[in-house]
Image (tube, rainbow, N blue to C red):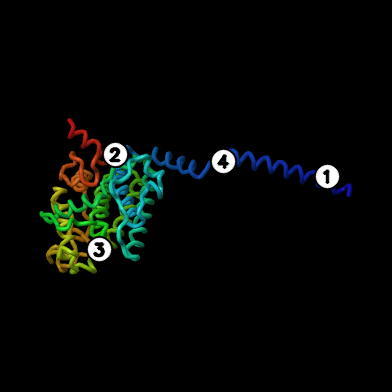
Amino acid sequence: MAAAMPFCSLALMMLGVLSSFCTAIHSAAVSDDDLLMLESSRRQQAIPASDADLLEFPLNLEYLEAEFFLWGSLGFGLDKFAPNLTMGGPSPVDARVARLDPFTRDVIYQFALQEIGHLRAIKSTVKGFPRPLLNLSAAHFAGVMNDAFGRPLEPPFDPYASGLNFLLASYLIPYVGLTGYVGANPELQSPTSKHLVAGLLAVESGQDAVIRALLYRRAAVMVAPYRITVAEFTSRISELRNQLGKSGLKDEGLVVRQVRGAEGRSRGNVLAGDEFSLGYARTPQEILRIVYATGDERVAGGFYPNGAKGRIAASYLQKSIT
């Protein structure tokens, strides 16, 4: 028994030291959020200023997509789902839940979650900015459709009225973002920036492909109550974006003249692409002209009543003031 006492005392002493060590480590430990902030700060320091501007600019579209898909599928947006990502920016105007069938709701919900991931990914690489004011009202979408057809549709188009309407409204959004990523990629300097944009482009392209495929399956279906086919809706929307972008053909509907189809051999156009079936590229100026619905990067409107955010967008709005 006497021989065992030194061992017990030593064991107790070691346990005491271990306990003190663990307490010290716990006190010095940082939270997961702190680690994320440290990693984000490290990445931001490694990104050239020109890259940071190009990476921040698409946050405008990622906010738009996240809010539209969240509201359409769930009936609420980032303010409830991920309020920290808004950075205190204003809530969207007149967004609401859509009347979606279970399949479409599931797809749109997945899109929403992906957009939240995109916001996190970009903000872990650059500082970012608060959510801009977004106009997601049915009236705005109705106005876009009226512009696309060159006349008022009666009754006014409502993106939230049905699954088909919501898919047609969704046709307006991801494609614009993906052309921006195609355009930004060759302008980037940092491998970190290029890797991020490649990943964002992959998923944005996937979303656009899903939307186009779901609509292509119903290309000949008449959209009630307009007696206009799904294919014609997409063609008119694409033509409008070409007009607003003012940079030639960079947008195509689901059915095209054969000479404009892949290899000049198909009128079906489930994916848009140039003569080599490569994705079209757009500049920030072209994107602003389209999403503002003004055809002028210096005049805010459309989805962004107060204008988009970030240094690039702000530079054009300042020019309009001066």
* Mark 3 or 4, closer to the camera: 3
Residue type marked 2: Gly
How many neighbours does mark 2 have within 10 angstroms: few (below 14), some (14-19), or many (20 or more)?
A: many
> Which callout, 4 or 2, points at the residue further toward the start of the chain?
4
State the SS at label 1.
helix
Residue topped by disc 1:
6
Residue topped by disc 2:
310
Distance between mark 4 and mark 2 Cα atoms: 34 Å
Where is residue 322? Give x, y as percent: 17, 30
Q: Is residue 293 left or right of residue 41?
A: left
State the SS at label 2.
loop
Where is residue 111? Give x, y as percent: 34, 57
> Which callout, 4 or 1, points at the residue further toward the start of the chain?
1
Instruction: Report if the CB atoms under discs 1 and 2 are less than 8 Å apart.
Output: no
Q: Considering only vertical position in the picture, is 89 above or below 106?
A: above
Distance between mark 1 and mark 2 Cα atoms: 68 Å
> Which callout, 3 or 4, points at the residue further toward the start of the chain?
4
Q: Considering only vertical position in the picture, is 165 above or below 58?
A: below
Distance between mark 3 and mark 2 Cα atoms: 33 Å
Q: Quadrant of residue 160?
A: bottom left
Instruction: Report if the CB atoms under discs 4 and 2 are less than 8 Å apart.
Output: no
Residue type marked 1: Pro
Residue 54 appears in the picture as rendered = yes
Where is residue 193? Give x, y as percent: 34, 46
* Mark 1 or 2, closer to the camera: 2
> Which callout, 1 or 2, points at the residue further toward the start of the chain?
1
Residue type marked 3: Leu
Q: Is residue 155 left or right of residue 163?
A: left
Residue topped by disc 3:
164
State the SS at label 3.
helix
What's the residue at 23%, 59% (across, down)?
Answer: 168
Q: Considering only vertical position in the picture, is 50 above or below 198?
A: above
